[in-house]
């Protein structure tokens, strides 16, 4: 066997595997890097939505201001903010080896996400009852309904998917098939969707309060 | 695989309370009768502060690799800066609609 054949044989047998592997970019784990890249892509998506919304809102005289009170939005925001804290408590418990605590707080976070989603759907039903659709509403500018449902709907989708993912990761963690690092990746996602909501509330609700 | 150290819970609670207070302030401003442009600037300022708090402390970016911090920061700043191309054109469109003038 010559030297070239020997190298190929070693590679096939796995004896030279460390030479064949590249270092993780930015010296962080691949799962975490993937989540950061996803978040960066999602920032562009939400930025595009909000830019399109602010463009339309600013360029349209007599933009509707239909929200008379946003107490329910305040409650939803408080739930989201608190769920961020519970997520971090769960993550910390996982890093300290407190498996039961990590599972419990992850489930609390997921339930908070589900409650938020239900309240959000209730908001949508109230808007639909007022006659707000994608292409029509009682107050004039048709773009209002489209922008409202698209922006809040995309956020709702993220939070709903996140809640389900949290439950799956939580149960897998409890069963020993996921570890604290998976919860850390989920924490990145959850903090991001909360941050997006903190931008949606002023842009969509507070700037459109009835005067 | 964990790269970020886990800080004490007190730090998280402090950041959480800051976020709650800032959000409450946003709601107070939202109910005030102030001009739309001024309100937008105030809301955006609070939004930037909230973003810094969440990304640095809750997403633990501050304890990550320096190259990753630079990569994410430059990218995000570029995206946020690129969003601002809309303003001039939206004001132009508003003017056309209000004065009924402009290209036919």
Image (cartoon, coloured by chain):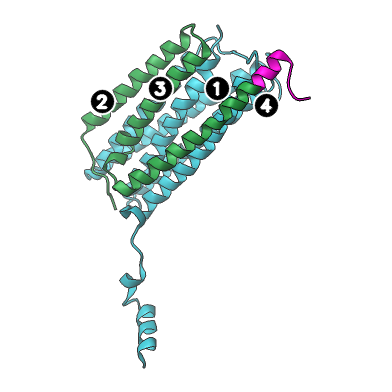
Chain colours: A cyan, B green
Mark 4 and mark 2, same subunit? Answer: no
Q: Residue tagged by mark 1?
A: A122
**Spatial distance from mark 1 to mark 3, Cα to Cα?**
30 Å
Q: Residues within 10 Å of mark 4 (few under 14, many from 20)?
A: some
Mark 3 and mark 2, same subunit? Answer: yes
Please say if A144 is above or below A45.
above
Do the residues bearing badges 3 and 4 touch, measured as CB atoms within 8 Å? no
**Spatial distance from mark 4 to mark 2, Cα to Cα?**
41 Å
**Secondary structure state at the residue bearing disc 3:** helix
- Mark 3 vs mark 2: give the one in front: 3
Which picture quadrant has residue A204?
Answer: top right
**Secondary structure state at the residue bearing disc 2:** helix
Examine the structure image and report whether residue A64 is included in the region drawn in magenta: no
Q: Residues within 10 Å of mark 1 (few under 14, many from 20)?
A: few
Q: Chain of mark 1?
A: A
Q: Residues within 10 Å of mark 3 (few under 14, many from 20)?
A: few
* Residue B45, disc: 3
Residue A39 image position (x, y, % from top left): 45, 42
Residue B70 image position (x, y, % from top left): 35, 44
* Residue A134, disc: 4
Q: Residue tagged by mark 2?
A: B14
């Amino acid at each position: 066997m010559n030297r070239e054949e020997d190298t190929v044989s070693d590679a096939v047998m796995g004896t030279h595997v460390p030479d064949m592997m590249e270092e993780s970019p930015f010296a962080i784990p691949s799962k975490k890097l993937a989540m950061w890249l996803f978040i960066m892509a999602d920032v562009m998506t939400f930025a595009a939505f909000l830019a399109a919304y602010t463009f339309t809102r600013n360029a349209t005289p007599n933009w509707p201001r239909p929200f008379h009170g946003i107490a329910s939005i305040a409650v939803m925001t408080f739930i989201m903010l608190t769920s961020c804290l519970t997520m971090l408590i769960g993550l910390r418990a996982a890093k300290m080896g407190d498996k039961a605590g990590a599972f419990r707080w992850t489930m609390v976070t997921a339930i908070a996400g589900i409650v938020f989603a239900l309240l959000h759907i209730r908001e949508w039903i109230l808007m639909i009852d007022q006659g707000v659709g994608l292409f029509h509403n009682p107050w004039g500018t048709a773009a209002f309904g489209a922008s409202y449902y698209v922006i809040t709907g995309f956020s709702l989708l993220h939070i709903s998917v996140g809640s389900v993912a949290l439950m799956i990761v939580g149960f897998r963690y409890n069963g020993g098939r996921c570890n604290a690092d998976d919860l850390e990746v989920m924490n990145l996602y959850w903090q991001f969707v909360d941050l997006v909501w903190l931008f949606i509330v002023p842009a969509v609700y507070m700037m459109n309060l009835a005067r | 695989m964990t790269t970020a150290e886990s800080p004490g819970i007190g730090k998280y609670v402090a950041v959480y309370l800051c976020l709650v207070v800032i959000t409450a302030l946003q709601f107070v401003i939202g109910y005030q009768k102030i001009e739309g442009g001024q309100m937008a600037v105030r809301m955006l300022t609070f939004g930037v502060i909230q973003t810094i708090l969440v990304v640095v402390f809750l997403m633990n970016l501050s304890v990550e690799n320096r190259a990753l911090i630079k990569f994410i920061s430059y990218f995000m700043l570029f995206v946020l800066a690129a969003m601002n191309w809309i303003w001039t054109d939206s004001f132009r469109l508003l003017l056309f609609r209000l004065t009924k003038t402009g290209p036919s």
